Image: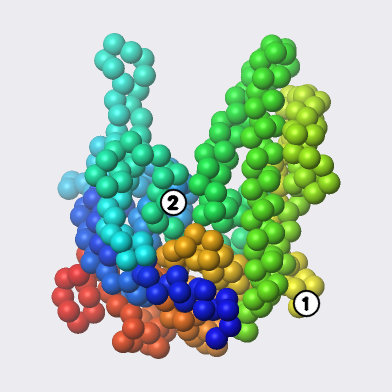
Amino acid sequence: MDNLAQSIQKVTSHKSGVTRLTLTDFRNYAFLRINAQLRPIVICGDNGSGKTNILEAISFLTPGRGMRGARLADIRRFTPAVVSNDYIPNNGSWAVSAQICKNDEDFEIGTMVENIRGDEDSESGAYNKRIVKIEGQKGASQAELGRYFSAIWLTPQMDRLFRGGSQPRRSFLDRLVYAFDNEHAKRTANFEHLYKQWYQLIKGSNGRADALWLSGLEESMAETGVAIAAARREQIARLNSFIENDPDDIFPNVMLELDGTIEKMLDKMPAVDVEDFYKRKLASERCKILYNDSVDGVNRTDFKVFFKKKRMPAELCSTGEQKSLLISIILAQTKCQILYQGFAPVLLLDEVAAHLDDLKREALLSKIKELGLQAWITSTNAELFASLEGCADFFEVKNNGIFAKGKGDA
């Protein structure tokens, strides 16, 4: 066993993961509780039975909008109406809570959404507010969740990651950054808010907005944007170095790049100079907003992936190769997190067997066992994961409930 494997094993010998998961009014579940062990968990069931909803609930124990990127209001449970074909939503509230283990130490964390109604005397309407609870105390920020729990996911929607626009790839990269920089999620959300303000101010005034106001927004956007770019560059360098020094024996080696003006400028200029450039650039491109043209910046950066052996960009690879490239990135990220964070992330693998041949599917399962990870895996066919018998828990989802295979209610 080499030094890297020994270092990883030293960390994962102290177990991390979800030991109890409770859902309330979440998607199709009025109430669901799962008691889990710190090992692979295979969840089987028919399409539409609610397997993915369980993984999505776990993803909400991390900062952000979960593995589907859904609006908070869309996650609430809908109940079929008694006398019509309509569906009646609850009041908008839902909750996910969990007992989690981090390096053999137990914690209680959770998140909920409450429907907040405006004052009767005000014009403000109802809105949904997400609340984070850690060790029984409300008021923690979403970023605080990252100190206790981390999850990495792979979904069928990500099979198209390399063939669409740059936004999903950028979001995927930012999720990888969150695990190492808890403030990155706050910065990206702040930048989006600033950009929206800037855009609406220019568009709404037909180009005659107050110059001092615009300049102030541009200064904040430049400062925040350069911090975002720097964090992305650091993560790409970290993963490339790790992949170079620890090549995989089954999954293809990848090379990662950032295709963005601000990120590339940081290769040759101090951050303070890049901020000045970015501010001037935003000011010079105000007129583009009036013609609905895109404005270059960190919100247009692309995340490029290459199949190193073939020297081929991921978008030109086959569907199976693209899935393997994604798994390569996720495995590298997982090992990096174990070493840098000092505790293992949980893997959320939704229908992961799709587009994988038998060799690669079994290789992935072997690596999960080897790394000692808790992985929540969904499938319509439990037989695909027969090699996990004896070292994994198998559950079946049906009728809005979950049952341990052959052991009754979970």
Q: Is residue 319 left or right of residue 377?
A: right
Q: Residue furthest right?
A: 268
Which three-letter amino acid code belongs to the residue tagged 1?
Lys
Which three-letter amino acid code belongs to the residue tagged 2?
Gly
Chain-order first, disc 1 or disc 2: 2
**Mark 1 highlights which residue?**
310
Tell which of 290 and 214 is nearer to you.
214
Say above or below: 132 vs 310: above
**Mark 2 highlights which residue?**
146
Quick one: SS at disc 2? loop
Identify which residue is drawn at 40% across, 88% down: 387
Disc marking residue 237:
none
Identify which residue is drawn at 47% across, 63% down: 342
**Mark 2: few, some, or many residues within 10 Å (few <14, many ≥20)?**
some
Quarter holding residue 290? top right
Identify which residue is drawn at 32% across, 66% down: 104
Quarter holding residue 283? top right
Q: Position of residue 369 (x, y in %)?
A: 43, 81
Which color scheme did the rendering employ for the protein? rainbow
Identify which residue is drawn at 64% across, 48% down: 231
